[in-house]
Structure formats: C-alpha cells, structure tokens
Image: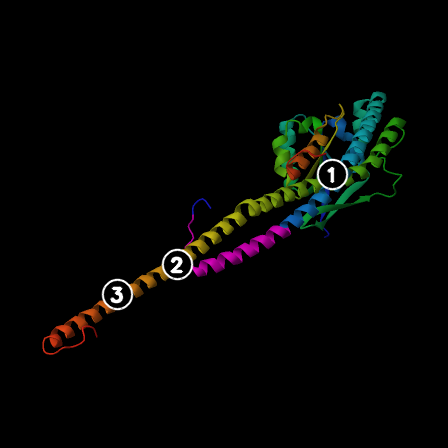
Amino acid sequence: MANITVSPTRMELTRLKGKLRTAQRGHKLLKDKRDELMKQFLDTVREVRALRAEVEEELMTVHGAFTVASALMSSEALEQALVYPKQSVELTMTFQNIMSVNVPVYDFQTQTRSDSDIYPYGFAATSGELDTAVDALGKVFRKMLKLAEIEKSAQLMAEEIEKTRRRVNALEYVMIPNTQEAIRYINMKLDENDRATTIRLMKVKDMILKESLEEKRAETARAVKTFGDSSEAPAEV
Amino acid sequence: MAVTYRIAAVGDWESVMGFRALGLDTYPVADAAEAREKVRELAKDNCAVIYLTEQLARDMDDVLTRYKDELRPAIILIPGREGSLGIGKNNIQRAIERAVGADIL
C-alpha cells in the first residue's frame, strides 16, 4: 500500500479481514460472470458475423433489383408506386436476460391481408422487376430484424463484459493486494506493540527488583551500623 | 409488454425506398447532418430499430457511439446502394476488441 492510513487496531484488523473475504468472494463471482458472458458473447458474435455477411450480400442483390426496376420506370412512377405502403410493421420488444444483461428480443407483426400481397401498387403501371425487388426485400427483412436483435445484444454484452473485466481487474490488482498489505501492516504493528509491552514489563520488573534489593542492603548496613558497635555480631545477616 | 415500436430506415432515397413497401418508416435524407438530426429525433420517439446506410454512418460516428450502449434504439448499418463499406463488419470487430481487450478472432 502506497500510503497507509489505517489505524493499527484490532478492530480495524477484524474489519479488514471481513473486507478481504468479501472482496475475494466478489472477485471469484465476477470472474465467473465474465467468463460465462465471454462465452455467450463469442457465440453471438460468430452468429452476427455470418448473418451480417449474408444480409449484406442479399441486400446488394435487392439494391441491384431496384436499380433495374428504376431503370425501367421513371423515378416519379417509382416513387408514386411505393409512396403509400399497404402493410405496416409493428414491433414489440421484450427482454431476455443473459447473465444480468438485458438484451432485446424483437417480434414484429405485419398488418396485411396476406404475405403474398405486399405490393402497395397496382400492377398496371409498374414493371415486373419492381415486384421481384420488393419480394426479395421482404425476404431479407426477416434476417435484417434478426441481425438487429443479435447485433444489439452483442453491443450490450460487449459493454457489460468491459465493465465486469474492469471490476475483476480492480479487485484482483488493487483492492485485494491493498487490503492484504494493510492486514500485514496491522499484524506487524500489533506484534511490535506486544513485544514493546513485554520488554517494558521486563524493564519495570528489573527496576523494581533493583530498588528493593538496594533498600534491603541499605537496611542491613543500617542494622550492622547500629548493632555492630555494642557486641560481636555476625558480619552478615 | 404491449408497447409497440416502429422500425425506421434512414438513408438516401434510392436505398430506402424499398423499405417503404414493407411498411417501415423511411426517412430519405441528403447528408450526414440531416441524418444526425433524424436519428436523434427517432431515438426520442418510439423507434426500436433504425437501419442506417453505411454511406451516412461514415460521418456519424459520434451518434453511433452515443446510442451504442442504449437498449433502444438499435442502429443497424446496412450497405447503401453504392455497396458495402465494411463499416458494419468493422463495428463487430470493435465490439470484440472492447470486450476482450484484444483482437482475438
């Protein structure tokens, strides 16, 4: 720990130990979450890539068909033919929860009489190529909607993975080592205090012993002095 | 959830006109500035999916980034009439890099 601001007390030590336990458990859980998310994400991404390539290719075909159609019709006629759509699309969005990431699931309803009758124009004034183009686009559209769904999921999951990865790293490389360092610091400080106390007690005991010894010696000396003159007493008590 | 959303297509007129026949809301725009306004407007409105041509998206990176992490709308790039620019594929790549921290695929 770069700057130690913990106070070396037992209470703080208990608190830090609890914190470390929580951090370690959180780290493990987040790591599991990250791994599972990553697995799902990579699956989704693979799907997105394949589908996107497919959609792009088919859309180019559709664009080509429209180009042909517009070459055969005047742009005014084309605009007129397409300006008032016969069917309308409504989208309902529900959510699916993948590892706490809400991803959208689209479901669309077309309001039209039948699937084959999607052409918003009479056939008299338009060319057959336009029918082909609209028909092809209708087929691509389902894939496009699926693409929207999984591509958005991929983006949202990417964001969540990034967040989770940061959290895992923060726990692993900052939070947990810092707490461990603080715990070690407190332990060392407490041990040091213990030793200091022992030494102090020993010193105090020494001093008291020395004091009482000196007192006793002084007493003996006094006694020898008082009684030594009058009679033959033993030299030592 | 009974809320219904709309699907929009934003792009030049030739690229989006076909979607009109399918019943999507089409918004022909001339340039990126106009498209930017339109996308913002649609995002506030109840629009869940916006198909945007890559030709416009090229100059609208800020808008794409802004809505990338929102649940709605999903802005999906489609190739315009002039062909694919690879921006859509590139975006997937960027998502991977973002998630993994490195380009792994």
Please provide percent x and percent y for residue A157.
Answer: 68, 43
**Image quarter for residue B68?**
top right
Is residue A114 found inside the magenta-colored segment of the image?
Answer: no
Q: Nearer the viewer, mark 3 or mark 1?
A: 3
Residue range of the region highlighted in magenta in the rendering: A4-29
Furthest toward the bottom, the residue is A231
The tag on residue A195 is 2
Overall secondary structure of the magenta stretch? helix
Label 1: state its secondary structure.
helix
The first of marks 3 and 1 along the sequence is 1
Disc 1: host chain: A
Q: Position of residue B96 (x, y in %)?
A: 68, 36
Confirm whether the magenta stretch covers residue A23.
yes
Q: A179 or A113: nearer the eye? A: A179
State whether residue A231 appears in this view: yes
Q: Indicate left or right for A177 with A232 as reference.
A: right
Q: Amino acid at mark 3?
A: Lys
Q: Residue furthest front?
A: A232
Q: Chain of mark 3?
A: A
According to the picture, the residue beneath numbered tag 3 turns out to be A210
Which amino acid does the dot numbered 1 rest on? Val
Q: CA distance from mark 1 to mark 2?
A: 61 Å
Q: Is residue A126 visible?
A: no
Which residue in the protein does label 1 denote?
A45
**Residue B60 point in image, percent of width and height:** 63, 30
Mark 2 residue element? helix
Look at 79% across and 32% down and name the residue there.
Answer: A53
Q: Nearer the viewer, residue A206 or A71?
A: A206
First in sequence, mark 3 or 2: give its number: 2
Element on which disc 3 rests: helix
The amino acid marked with disc number 2 is: Arg
